[in-house]
Amino acid sequence: MSDTTPNEAFGAGAGTPPATVPTEDVPGTLAAHEDRDGDGLPDDLVAELGDEALAPAEPSGAFGTPGQPMNRHSPFYLGLVGGLGLLAAYGIVLLLTGLSQVLTLVVISLFLALGLDPVVRWLQRLGLRRTYAVLAVFVGVLVVFGGIVALVAPPVVQEAGQLASAAPDYAQSLLKNHTLRQLDDQYGVVDEITKRLKSGSLWTSVFGGVVGAGKAVLSGFFSAFTVLVLTMYFTASLPGFKAAAYRLVPRSRRQRFTVLAEEISRRVGGYVIGQISIATINGIFSFIMMEIVGIPYPAVLAVTVGVLGLIPMVGATLGAVIVVVVALFDSWTSTIIVASYYLVYQQVENYVIVPRIMNRTVAVPGAVTVVAALAGGTLLGILGALMAIPIAAGLLLIYKEVVLPRQEQH
């Protein structure tokens, strides 16, 4: 290998005195300073630092000896790492907050998938492949949902048409009202309404409300469609998801973790199916009762009772109160019959139907049920109250099977 000079390497002009440096001792060519001793460092830097400061403590490579690692107990290091940790935690919180709606849809879909999984497994035991079992379950869900919509939509449309037809009569009745005429004489109500109608501000607010309602409907439809697609995907891929999650657990604890996780999954699925079954039974018997008694709008009220029945503890009572209030507008006899029916039915539901359906599915003490339902309802509304009880059941299982045995060992 031939010797080169810094001037030759960077194209120095003629007449510059060359400073010859052997390239085998220099990791890189120096352009600004001379290196007369061939140690790879500029001579003026060596003179500034001194030989002792640059003397290697042990044999090193061409770029020098690595220094001591940073002291991890120094205040600077602790403050830097702690600050970065706080920034990272704050960024994660912002990320989760921004994705809260998406995460809510994912959690709801996973919860529904766990609820549908027992039905899929039952169909698999009958001989169907999982793909066809999932397809059959979702076809059944769509048929039931379509049937409910077909049952509820016609009465709602009919009642809306009746209200629109009766609106002019209601307006004439209001104009003939003595109290309204006195208010108009005293406060100029009619003149104010006329002014607002002519100004156009009322129509702007009305159409703004209509647009807002339309956006809410579209958003709700999109959310429902997203939940449907995710639920189908999660249900079809649930075994693979579980296997992937279980592989993250160390082998020494994987078997016990799998057993506990499968038991929690079974309880969640059983609770969802059980609660839907109880609410459906309540809605069907309510519809039969209202048809016999002659309560108006039995289909709409029965669906309302069934949906409210999904809410733990208070849902069935709320549905009963709504039907009793509607019966008040019919007759006192109907009101007494409806109230008596629900008093008897709720006793039968609490002591006969619920124990048989929920047997060996979710065993949660009453106080824990109340607290879990209140907490879940506060966080996620009706869906939170519905999910809170099986989650509480899973936590109780972990408490009994993991926490207490470990405490007894010490």
Image (spheres, grey):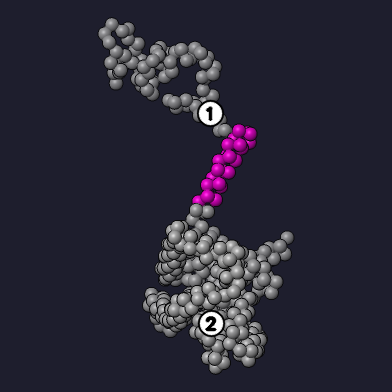
Classify residue 320 by image quadrant. bottom right
**Is 270 situated left or right of 409 in this image?**
left
Residue ranking furthest to the front: 185
Q: Where is residue 165? Give x, y as percent.
A: 44, 79
Considering the numbered disc 1 on the image, is that residue within a helix, a strand or a loop?
Answer: loop
Of residues 306 and 159, the one drawn nearer to the viewer in this rendering: 159
Which of label 1 and label 2 is nearer to you? 2
Q: Where is residue 107? Give x, y as percent.
A: 51, 64
Q: Which residues are magenta?
A: 73-95
Q: Tag on residue 1?
A: none
**Is residue 84 rendered magenta in the image?**
yes
Q: Where is residue 295? Give x, y as percent.
A: 55, 88
To which residue does mark 2 refer?
301
Of residues 288 and 335, the one drawn nearer to the viewer in this rendering: 335
To which residue does mark 1 refer?
67
- Which of the two labelled residues, at mark 1 and mark 2, occupies the earlier sequence position? 1
Q: Where is residue 7? Give x, y as percent.
A: 31, 14
Q: CA distance from mark 1 to mark 2?
A: 79 Å
Considering the numbered disc 2 on the image, is that residue within a helix, a strand or a loop?
Answer: helix
Classify residue 398 by image quadrant. bottom right
**Picture residue at 38% right of the left edge, 21% below the top:** 26
- The residue type indicated by label 2 comes to Leu
Of residues 90 and 290, the one drawn nearer to the viewer in this rendering: 290
Q: Is residue 292 above or below residue 144?
A: below
